[in-house]
Image (cartoon, rainbow, N blue to C red):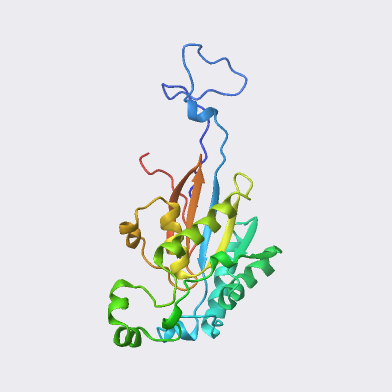
């Protein structure tokens, strides 16, 4: 994973200033280097596969299938290497079951948060995409489930949960947040400050894949998206 931490202090000319030496009084170190690093990271982890995922049904509270359980075990081994300081999860069955292997490997307790639940699908829950198109063509074209949650409502509550979780973290640490495809994507878009007409620019997450968001000095940044392996260090991004 790339680090946002500042490197060794250097002069404006690029010469390194070692500890204990007397820097040229005419050279002032960049102001950013003098500030403490208050960065925190959130690993946004989608639950493993369910039978209704395979059938393309709008889900309610559905357990993981056998493949989903295997996905959770594999991903947990990778995510444990990131040494998370906390695990938060939607209280729905498939999310809690995904979080369990990581909790076992790290010794952390999973904190449930109902604001991390998937979008309430109302009358669409249990229906396939084809059935929704046939029965609710107008609502499908607007992606507005009857008696369900609006897109904005999901974004608002998921974003609020993510911000609340980030505020519990010690600078320099990360938390794993186990949730659902729409909740994570919409919450992340809101957290990043994207206008609603650009929320679709963030693509979907595969089952048991994750994204990484970082907050530094009050600003959020998308670091990884739809990952299934540990990221390589970012040595330079020309910034």
Examine the rendered structure and indicate whether residue 35 appears above or below residue 186: above
Q: Nearer the viewer, residue 38 or 166?
A: 166
Q: How many numbered markers are drawn?
A: 0
Residue found 52% across the figure and 82% down from its top? 67
User: In the image as oriented, which residue stretches furthest toward the top?
Assistant: 25
Taking the image as shown, residue 46 lies to the left or right of residue 89, namely left
Question: Is residue 58 visible in this depiction of the protein?
Answer: no
Residue found 38% across the figure and 86% down from its top? 128
Examine the rendered structure and indicate whether residue 52 appears above or below residue 221: below
Q: Position of residue 198 (x, y in %)?
A: 31, 57
Taking the image as shown, residue 35 lies to the left or right of residue 211, namely right
Q: Nearer the viewer, residue 186 or 27?
A: 186
Q: Position of residue 219 (x, y in %)?
A: 46, 43
Question: Is residue 134 visible in this depiction of the protein?
Answer: yes
Taking the image as shown, residue 32 lies to the left or right of residue 151, namely right
Examine the rendered structure and indicate whether residue 178 appears above or below residue 12: below
Q: Position of residue 107 (x, y in %)?
A: 71, 64
Screen quadrant of the C terminus: top left
Q: Position of residue 12 (x, y in %)?
A: 43, 22
């Amino acid at each position: 994973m790339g680090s946002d931490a500042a490197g060794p202090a250097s002069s404006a000319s690029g010469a390194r200033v070692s500890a204990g030496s007397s820097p040229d009084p005419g050279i002032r170190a960049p102001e950013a280097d003098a500030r403490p690093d208050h960065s925190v990271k959130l690993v946004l982890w989608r639950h493993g596969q369910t039978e209704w995922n395979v059938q393309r049904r709008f889900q309610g509270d559905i357990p993981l299938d056998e493949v989903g359980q295997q996905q959770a075990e594999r991903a947990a081994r990778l995510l444990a290497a990131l040494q998370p300081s906390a695990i938060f999860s939607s209280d729905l069955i498939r999310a809690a079951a995904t979080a369990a292997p990581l909790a076992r490997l790290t010794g952390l307790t999973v904190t449930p948060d109902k604001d991390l639940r998937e979008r309430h699908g109302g009358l669409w829950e249990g229906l396939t995409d084809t059935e929704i198109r046939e029965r609710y063509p107008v609502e499908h074209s607007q992606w507005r489930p009857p008696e369900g949650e609006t897109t904005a409502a999901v974004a608002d509550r998921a974003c609020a949960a993510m911000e609340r979780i980030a505020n519990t973290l010690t600078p320099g640490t990360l938390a794993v947040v186990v949730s659902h495809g729409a909740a994570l994507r919409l919450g992340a878009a809101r957290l990043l400050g994207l206008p609603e007409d650009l929320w679709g620019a963030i693509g979907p997450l595969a089952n048991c894949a994750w994204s990484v968001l970082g907050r530094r000095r009050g600003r959020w940044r998308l670091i990884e998206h739809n990952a299934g392996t540990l990221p390589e260090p970012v040595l330079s991004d020309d910034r």
